[in-house]
Amino acid sequence: MFNVTESVIRLFLFWGGILFFLILELVISYRPSSVSKLKRWINNLALTLFNSILLNLIFSAAIVGTAAYAQKNQLGILNLIEIPTWLKILVTVAFMDFMLYVWHLLNHEMPFLWRFHRVHHSDLNMDVSSATRFHIGELAISAVIKISLIFFLGASALGVLIFESAVVLCAQFHYSSIKVPKWFETIFWVLFVPPSMHRIHHSVIIKERNTNYSTIFSLRDRFLGTLLKDVDQDKIRIGVGAYRKPDQLNFHQLLAMPFTKPIR
Ligand SMILES: [Zn+2]
C-alpha cells in the first residue's frame, strides 16, 4: 500500500513540479536560451523517460521499500536506539542530504564517476528539464549506494520519502531559469540552494564548477569550504568546455558519452 501511495506522490510531485516551473520560466524568464530549448527538452526528457522506464521504477520503489524493511526488522543504527519518530525522520533527512553532498563531490573529484556526471553538466542551458538529465549509469551506482546507506542507518521510511520528494522539488527549483527577486535569493542562500548558487556549479570554468555541491541545504558547502558566491551571474556560461555544440549532445551521444575519451 505504502508503495502505491508513494509512487503516486512521486509522480504527482515530479510532473507537477515540471509543469509549475515551466510555466514560471515562461512568465518570469531569467534569460533567453542560447540554444534551441525544444531540442534540449527532447534530449533531456528522452533521458528522463529512458531512466524512468529502465531504472527509476525499480529503484525508487526499492529505496523506500528498503527503509520500510529495515524498520520492520529493526535493522540499522537508528533501530538499535530508542529515539522519537520525529527525530528519526529528521536524522534520516539530514544524513541522506549530507551523503548526497559527498556523492556529488566524489562525482567531480573521481575521474571514473565524472565520466558519467559530465552528461548532466554538458547541458548548454539550465532549466527545469536539466534537473533529471542524468546518465543511467550514474543513477544506478547512486541507487545501490543509497540503498546500502539506508540499511546502515536504519533510516525512517517516511524520512526517506520526505527526503526524496524534497530533492526533486529543490532540484527543479534551482535548475529553473527564472528571475528570482534578489531579497528572496539572499534569504534563501542562508539555508537552501537558490538558482544563482547552482548556476555557478554549472559554469564551464572548472574552478567555479567544483563548488556549490549542495542539493537541499546550502549549509554543507558553507561549513565544508566549497561555497562560492561572488561570481558575475550574467557572465556565467553553462556547460562543459569540450562540448559546445548542440549536435554533439543528442540522446544517443549522451548515452555513449561516459565511454568516450576522458575530458575535464
Ligand atoms: Zn555536479
Image (cartoon, rainbow, N blue to C red):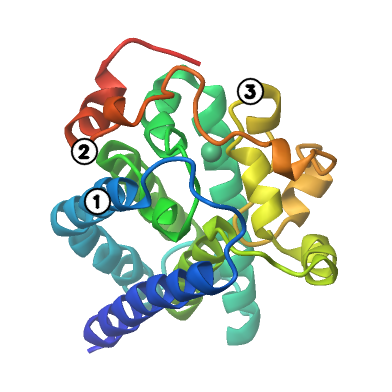
Whether disc 1's CB lies below 8 Å from ligand 1 is answered: no
The residue at the point 41 percent across, 66 percent down is 75
Rendering coords of residue 153 (x, y %): 51, 60
Residue at 21% from the left image edge and 51% from the top image edge: 46
The answer to whether residue 33 is above or below residue 161 is above
Question: Which mark is first along the chain, 3 or 1?
Answer: 1
Confirm if mark 3 falls within 8 A of ligand 1. Answer: no
Query: Which mark, by number, is residue 206?
Result: 3
Which sits in the foreground, 25 or 264?
25
What is the secondary structure assignment of the residue under circle 3?
A: helix
| 34 lies above or below 243 | below
Question: Going from the N terminus, do you reach mark 1 or mark 2 first?
Answer: 1
* Amino acid on which disc 1 is placed: Ile
Instruction: Give the camera-side residue of 124 and 18.
Output: 124
Query: Which residue type carries mark 2?
Result: Phe
Residue on which disc 2 sits: 251
Quarter holding residue 262: top left
Horizontal side of residue 22 vs 171, given as left or right: left
Tag 3–tag 2 contact (CB < 8 Å): no
| x and y, in percent, of residue 183 in the image | 85, 70
Q: Quadrant of residue 230?
A: top right
Measured as percent of width and height from the top left, residue 188 is found at 77, 67
Sequence-first tag of 3 and 2 = 3
Q: Nearer the viewer, residue 232 or 175?
A: 232
Q: Which residue is mark 1?
A: 42
- Quick check: marks 1 and 2 in contact, CB under 8 Å? yes
